[in-house]
Image: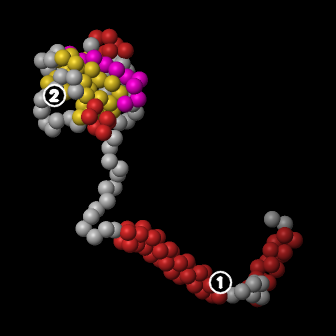
Amino acid sequence: MKDRDERELRRGLRAMVTEPPPGPPMTGVIEAARARRRRDRAGLGVVAVLVAGSLVLPGMLTRDRGAQRPLTPPPVPSAVASVAPMPRGSGPVVVGQQYHFDLYVHCGIRYTTFGGRPWRAAPEDTERYASYDVGRVYTLRGTMTLVSTDEARFRSDTGDVTATFRPVGRIEPCD
């Protein structure tokens, strides 16, 4: 640093110490910021109360005494008759009936358990969907139909995956 630059720097520092900086004093700025934060928090509290009230109040005003409205519209009768929920546990399944079914596809489409029995995908389906991946979920939603006592057929909800399964003695682990 040159002598002239050093003298200028010292002069500027001395001026900062002896003369207050322009603008409001720092304590005033800090107090104004604190007041603004308190006002903002109070406003958020009022908004939260208004939102909660707008969600609860209409239900209280329109509710019939003793009667409850369903949260979802009633299902379409044709959809209810065509697909049944899976029986809990290892309950029996009926030939010809479609059941909502989540097919586990971690190792591709190879094995599943349906109606309390282990099933293996037909060889052509095992090869076709050997590396089938639905992301990190590892299940494929669809329907499973028991075509006969020795054949079950899976169809994905999107319709792009179909697989035929035959009963086996046990399920083999992934490779």
Query: Mark on residue 93?
Result: 2
The residue that appears at 28% across and 70% down in the rendered structure is 65
- Image point 41% across, 23% down: which residue? 160
Instruction: Name the side, left or right, on which 171 lies relative to 121.
Output: left
Q: Residue at x 84, y 75 (%)?
A: 8
Tell me where residue 108 sits by quadrant. top left
Q: Which structural element holds mark 2?
A: loop
Residue 105, position as x, y percentages in the image: 31, 27
- Give the extent of the magenta segment: 157-166
- The residue under label 1 is 29
Q: Is residue 78 visible?
A: yes
Question: What is the quadrant of residue 58 in the picture?
Answer: bottom left
Q: Going by the image, does 100 lie left or right of 134? A: left
Front residue (pair 13, 160) = 160
Q: Position of residue 39 (x, y in %)?
A: 55, 82
Rendered view: 3 above or below 75: below
Q: How far across and how far down the image is residue 16, in percent?
A: 76, 82
State the quadrant of the N terminus.
bottom right
In-image side of 50 versus 33 (left or right): left
Q: Is residue 163 magenta?
A: yes
Disc 1, SS = helix
In what quadrant of the picture does the C terminus appear?
A: top left
Looking at the rendered structure, the number of numbered marks drawn on it comes to 2
Location of residue 131 in the rendering, given as x and y in whole percent from the top left corner: 37, 21
Three-letter amino acid code at the position of disc 1: Val
Are discs 1 and 2 less than 8 Å apart at CB? no
Q: Is residue 66 found inside the magenta-colored segment of the image? A: no
- Upstream in sequence: badge 1 or badge 2: 1
